[in-house]
């Protein structure tokens, strides 16, 4: 293979992995309609939890 083809393959691999990592960022929760009031967003229909989960800092938080 030529040198430029190897470089192109590496660049494609790096950009693909970056995209996969970026897609995985976010918070778990139900999808809510935009018109849902803030108090009702991300509420599940099941029994209420005793305490909400703590918001732990994540490595990529400063980028968001």
Image (cartoon, helix red, strand yellow):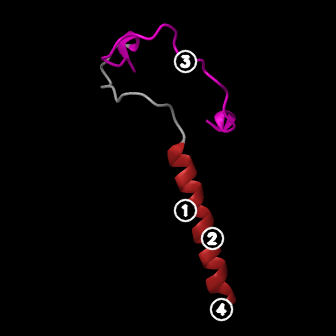
Badge 4 density bin: few <14, some 14–19, many ≥20, Cα 10 Å:
few
Disc 2, SS: helix
Disc 4, SS: loop
Q: Please report whichever mark, 1 or 4, sits nearer to the chain's N-terminal start.
A: 4
Q: Is residue 63 magenta?
A: yes
Residue in view at x 64 percent, y 24 percent: 56
Looking at the image, do the residues carrying marks 4 and 3 touch, with CB atoms under 8 Å apart?
no
Q: Is residue 51 magenta?
A: yes
Looking at the picture, does residue 51 appear above or below residue 21?
above
> For mark 4, what is the residue?
2
> For mark 3, what is the residue?
53
* Closer mark to the observer between disc 4 and disc 3: 3
* Closer mark to the observer between disc 1 and disc 3: 3
Say left or right for 21 vs 62. left
Q: Please report whichever mark, 2 or 4, sits nearer to the chain's N-terminal start.
A: 4
Looking at the image, do the residues carrying marks 3 and 2 touch, with CB atoms under 8 Å apart?
no
Q: Please report whichever mark, 4 or 3, sits nearer to the chain's N-terminal start.
A: 4
Disc 1, SS: helix
Q: Please report whichever mark, 1 or 3, sits nearer to the chain's N-terminal start.
A: 1
- Is the C terminus in the top left, top right, bottom left or bottom right quadrant? top right
> For mark 2, what is the residue?
11
Residue nearest the observer in this picture, 58 or 51: 51
Q: Marks 1 and 3, how far apart in space?
A: 32 Å
Disc 3, SS: loop
Q: Name the dominant secondary structure of the magenta segment.
A: loop
> For mark 1, what is the residue?
16
């Amino acid at each position: 293979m030529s040198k430029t083809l190897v470089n192109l393959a590496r660049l494609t691999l790096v950009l693909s992995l970056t995209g996969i990592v970026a897609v995985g960022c976010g918070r778990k929760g139900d999808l809510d309609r935009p018109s849902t009031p803030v108090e009702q967003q991300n509420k599940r229909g099941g029994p209420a939890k005793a305490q909400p989960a703590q918001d732990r800092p994540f490595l990529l938080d400063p980028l968001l």
